[in-house]
Structures are given as C-alpha cells and as structure tokens.
Amino acid sequence: MQHQNFNILILGASYGSLLAIKCLAAGHHVTMTCRTATSERINAEGIRVRLPVKGRKDLGTGGLLEIDSRTLPGRLHASTPQQVDDLSDFDLVVLAMQEPQYRQDGIRQLMARIAQAGLPCMPIMNMPPLPYLARLRQHAPQLDVSACEAAYADPGVWKDFNPALMTLSSPDPQAFRPVDEPVNVLQVALPTNFKVARFESDAHTQILRQLESDIEAVRLDVGGGPIELPVKLKVFDSLFVPLAKWSMLMTGNYRCVQADTVRPIREAVLGDRAASQAVYDWVADVCVALGASPDDLVSFDKYAAAADGLVKPSSAARALAAGATHIERVDIIVQTLAAQIGMHNATVDQTTRLVDAWLARNRAA
C-alpha cells in the first residue's frame, strides 16, 4: 500500500483523544464524535493531551508535555453522531467508548451505518465486541459466542458487523480528564502502548501497520531538540494479545468490588498476592486453552508491579458505587467462555455475583 494520510473516525472524545492526538501528530486526519457542547469546544479550541515524557521533568507542569492539536499537521473535526454524513470518506473507524454507550440513541444508528458501509473497525475496549469473539472460533471452533450475549448492554448493536472487519486494541494506556479542566483536556497517567490485533485481510492490516510506523516516527521539538513521544500503536498477528488484559481485569478491576464497598486496585491485587496470582494465572490458562500462546500474555509479576501504583478503585467499581445500571461485563465473558471449555474458578464466580448484586441494587433504586 502506498503511503497515504488516512481519514479516521473516532467514536468518543474522552479516551479517544489520546489516539487522536497520536494520529494527528503523524499527519492523519481525525473526526471525533461527541456531545454537542464538547464538539463545539473542540472545533473552537482543539484538544490538549498531557503526556509524561521519560527523563524530561523540565517539560510543562509537573513534567507533563501538553500537546495542542492545533499545532499538529493532521486536521481535526468534531461532531455529534447524527452529524456524521458521508462514511465513504473514512479509511478506519475507532470505537473508543465503553460497551454500554453504543446502545445510546444517535450512536446506535451511526453504528448500524458503519456496519452497513463495511468499514474496518478498531475498538479500543476492555470488552471485545461480539464480532471479535466470533474470530476466536478460528482457534476454538467449539465456542458458542451467542452464549456471551448476556454480557452486553445491547447485543443487537453488533449483529450486522462482519467479524473480518473487526479487530481489537487493548486500552492499556491510562488517562483521565482532570477535575476542573475543560472537556477537551486529557491527561495520561500511565503511558503504555495500544496493542492491536491484525485484521483478517492484509489490506486492512496494512492501515494499522502504517499507523504504527507513522506514530513511531513522530518527534516533537519542544526546546532542547526533538523528543520521542510515549504511547505507541503496536500491531500483532495474534488475536489474543489484546486479551492479555483479561487477567488484569479479573484480578484487579473487578475484584475492587466488595459486598458493600469498593477498594483500590492496589489493595485488590496486593492485599493477598497469592490469591491474586491464582486468579491471574487461571484466566491466562483460559486464554491459552482458547488458542493463545503464553508469549501473547503478560506475567503476573509485571502486572503486580504496575498495580502497586494504582491507588484508586477501578472505573468499573467507581461507576457501580456512583449508581451505574450498566458497566462492561468482561467478567461474564471470561466466565462463560471458560465454562464452555470445562474451566471454572470459585473466585471469578464470586466476583461476578458481587457485580450482579451491585447492578441489581442500582437498577432497583
């Protein structure tokens, strides 16, 4: 494929801003969908993403480099989902929201149009869309993916998507909107890489590989010479590399949820290290049984070292504590797929029951 500047549609302007700023810096053009007020601010002021740069504590405030989209070579436009007009303009769609959001009015209709248009889609989600799970049947043909539909807020959102056009990227970099800042500001807390699996076709995979190469090559001169930016896009042939996050979610994020309270990820993982490693390794064993190579996965020790700095409850736990009636249910997907290959884990079952109970209370309220 000849080098070209891609037009990329990103659904979601919060976490999606991180990949957007990387693509814009590499010269590609981005349209982001979001609420009306957010789109108006982005079109007026651009987006600003703050990144920690290793060895450069002198940058910006607190060692954070702030990148302003208006200074970058790529073009940025924001709109509501209803305002997205001609989908034929786009080379790639990035789904950068949590799974329950895709059923919302406006977004759901745009998703149906994207499926009909046959555009390649790269979700940046902890929870793999149903069409991506269908691709796992290449390795485990006995899987009944329809049994996982109960995990989704609205499985019908995904029914028209072609699995061959659906990949998955793990949302490993951690980022948040700072309190008391405008909605077009995002701050990166953990500048790790996006890890994405290839598409079925070489042509669509080449889009990912060009983005990988272009993002890798970006250097910004902020005084003192050009610097390399953290947070890259890494493309893998294995479908299971993005699923390495499952062990982390089941060990840390969901185990933040207790019967009547929530706890920090650090406490969930390191409060009883042996119990945590047992869950972590069991989920890894599930992935291997489905067809993953151990090399696709991340060691428990590496995850535990990262968890030592995660002093807040997970976003899923915080959402439940705030009264959410839907959250992403990767726990149900792991439990369901594991059961289909004869694997069960009492701690995972208990975690799933705790999340079920919180959701039931929130919906009753």
Image (cartoon, rainbow, N blue to C red):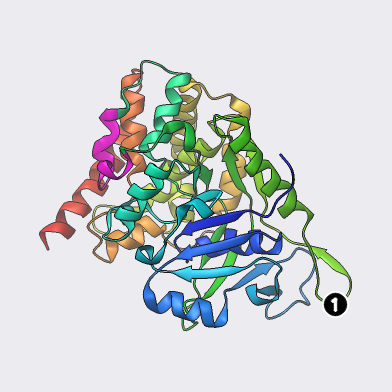
Q: In which quarter of the image is the C terminus?
A: bottom left
147 magenta-colored: yes
Residue located farthest toward the left when viewing the structure as drawn:
364
Q: Report the residue at 39% width, 66% height from top.
A: 83
Q: Report the residue at 66% width, 65% height from top.
A: 74
Q: Is residue 64 above or below residue 250?
A: below
Q: Is residue 165 above or below residue 266?
A: above
- Could you tell me residue 240's position as x and y percent? 53, 31
| Main secondary structure along the magenta-highlighted residues | helix
Residue located farthest toward the right when viewing the structure as drawn:
225
Amino acid tagged 1: Gly
Task: Read off the magenta span.
Answer: 146-158
Q: Report the residue at 41% width, 68% height from top.
A: 34
* Occupied quadrant, residue 84: bottom left
Q: Name the residue under label 1.
A: 223
> Secondary structure beneath disc 1?
loop
- Could you tell me residue 57's position as x and y percent? 76, 73
Give the camera-side residue of 161 and 309: 161
